[in-house]
Image (cartoon, rainbow, N blue to C red):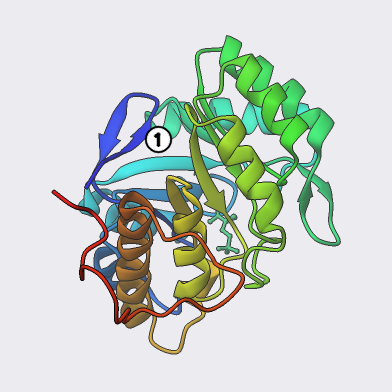
Amino acid sequence: MSCLDIYGTKLDSRMLIGSALYSSPRVMLESIVASGAQVVTLSLSRQNPGQMGGESFWNIIRSLDLHLLPNTAGCHSIKEAVSMAQMSRELFQTDWIKLELVGDDFNLQPDPIDLVKATEILLNDGFKVLPYCTDDLVIARHLVELGCKVIMPWGSPIGTGKGLLNPYALQAIRDRFPEVTMIIDSGIGVPSHAMQAMELGVDGILLNTAVAHAQHPQKMAQAFRGAIEAGRLAYEAGPMAEQYAASASTPTLDSPFWHQA
Ligand SMILES: CC(=O)[C@@H](O)[C@H](O)COP(=O)(O)O
């Protein structure tokens, strides 16, 4: 199967996993391993290696030897997000940043205007920006025109588990920007949501709550791994076109094959 491309880094796994909300370090570690993810996202504001408790968290993450994707979770302004990104780059030694800029606390909806402005600042500062955005085609266009090689529209708001609120909007982004790596970030609740997104042709899935809050996170991580792989395989296989009316799958006339070699 083809690879996930993050600014030129090619990965076999199309799943990116969060490191928050787990019941214990052991459950987090086992879940991340079970997911097969090669990218783990983490937040300097919540998992700072220099702070109490942060060091043991950091040692576990480091032991996994995965790509780190620091995020700017909880930032509400451009200034805050830019300085969080810069500190994360120093501390985690990576120029990848998941840019999250909250526009409203009710549903943690990204601020579309400031997100674009902050993206421009960070790209100019040498970051490889993975912006967390809504499923708005025009915002996606601005981000792509600035030079983002990856965009991460939501399925639905963070932690809701509602799945894909607007498959049409996501499909439009996919079709409009086939050259860009498109990762669905947030709101995925069950593996079938992830599979639906992959069948639309998106490149990857970033999720956290659905695994961390499952009754058995390790098993759920494994279930997501299978669903994401199956969804991608189905997309590459080219699904049949939906039909309005029935057509017999066991015709009684002519050749049993429709393609005459
Ligand atoms: C871990 C992370 O970056 C989250 O903020 C992300 O958006 C995942 O969202 P869910 O928890 O809804 O999967």
The image quarter in which residue 217 lies: bottom left
Residue 188 lies left or right of residue 140; in this view the side is left
Q: Residue furthest top?
A: 124
Report which quarter residue 248 is drawn in: bottom left
Q: Nearer the viewer, residue 189 or 46?
A: 189
The spot of residue 98 in percent (x, y) is 55, 38
Please tell me which residue is depicted at 31% across the width and 82% down the height of the picture.
250
Q: Which x, y percent locates residue 223?
A: 34, 76
**Residue drawn at the location 75% of the way across and 41% of the way down:** 136
> Does residue 73 appear in the picture of this structure?
no
Name the residue nearer the viewer: 190 or 159: 190
Ligand 1 is found in the corner quadrant, namely bottom right
Circle count: 1
The three-letter amino acid code for the residue at tag 1 is Phe
Query: What is the x, y in percent for residue 242?
Result: 53, 65
Q: Position of residue 168 (x, y in %)?
A: 69, 53
Q: Residue furthest left?
A: 261
216 relative to 49, above or below: below
* Residue at x 80%, y 29% (from the top left corner): 114
In-image side of 74 versus 23 (left or right): right
Instruction: Pick whichever, 241 or 59, lies toward us.
Output: 241
**Above-or-below relation of 154 to 256:** above
Q: Which residue is mark 1?
A: 92
The vertical placement of 163 against 131, above or below, is below
Query: How busy is the neighbourhood of tag 1: few (under 14 within 10 Å), some, or many (20 plus)?
Result: some
> Mark 1 falls on what kind of element?
helix
Name the residue: 63% across, 58% down. Answer: 155
Whether residue 205 is visible: yes
